[in-house]
Amino acid sequence: MLCIKQCWLAFGCSLLVLLTSCSNAPRHVAVDPTNPEAIGHWEGRLNLRIANNPPEQFSTAFEMTGRPEKGQLSLLSPLGTTLAMVRWNPQGASLQQGSDVQNFVSMDELTLRLTGAALPLPQLMAWLDRTGPPVNGWQINAQALPSGRRVMADRLQPLPALKLTVLLDPNP
């Protein structure tokens, strides 16, 4: 009996060491609007609700690097493994899930195919660091919190309605 407890304790300690060694310190580097070459970096959690019939909801950790013209977004599992990778540039966008890669003409087409609506990436990225520009058809609210920054974006028209919530990790 003692041997079984010791094995479980050793397994638990090993798992804890593994998980803490895989974690990264949160980084948050804003895109400088006066420098078009500046690259932003954000980490946190996102939740997307799509008012389809039946409703769909997607929630995951993420890491995003880039700017509206070029960048990448990694969607992460609770253990930090990459579930999907989205990359975009002026030539198009791609979605990679494991070894499966789908190519799209633009981020608008990619988000349209995945959510039923094109998400306004440049405007939403501006809201990650500060109060961004208004976006036609969207209600966007951003708040600075002690635990980071929260951006809530609601789109009521065209249907399906969407609710995107992003909670950014605080600066280290």
Image (tube, helix red, strand yellow):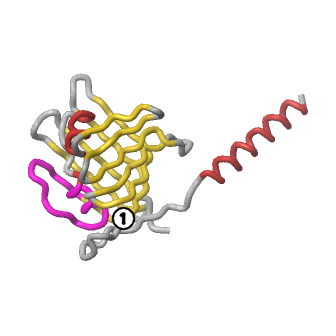
Q: In this view, does 45 lie to the left or right of 67?
A: right
Q: Position of residue 98 (x, y in %)?
A: 47, 34
Q: Which residue is found at the position 61% from the left and 51% from the top?
A: 22
Three-letter code, disc 1: Gly
Q: What stretch is highlighted in magenta?
A: 122-141
Give the residue furthest to the bottom: 34
Q: Which residue is found at the position 46% from the left and 33% from the top?
A: 99
Q: Which of 146 and 41 is in front in this view?
A: 41
Count of marks overlaid on the render: 1
Q: Where is residue 123 in the image (x, y as percent from the top left)?
A: 20, 58
Q: Quadrant of residue 54?
A: top left
Q: Position of residue 134 (x, y in %)?
A: 13, 59
Q: Is mark 1 on a helix, strand or loop?
A: strand
Q: Quadrant of residue 140?
A: bottom left
Q: Which residue is found at the position 79% from the left and 35% from the top?
A: 8
Q: Which of 31 and 151 is in front in this view?
A: 31
Q: Nearer the viewer, residue 5 or 22?
A: 22
Q: Quadrant of residue 12?
A: top right
Would you place residue 151 above or below residue 93 in this image?
below
Q: Nearer the viewer, residue 5 or 60?
A: 60
Q: For mark 1, does the 10 Å Cα neighbourhood hold few (<14), some (14 to 19), or many (20 or more) residues?
A: many
Q: Name the residue under label 1.
A: 40
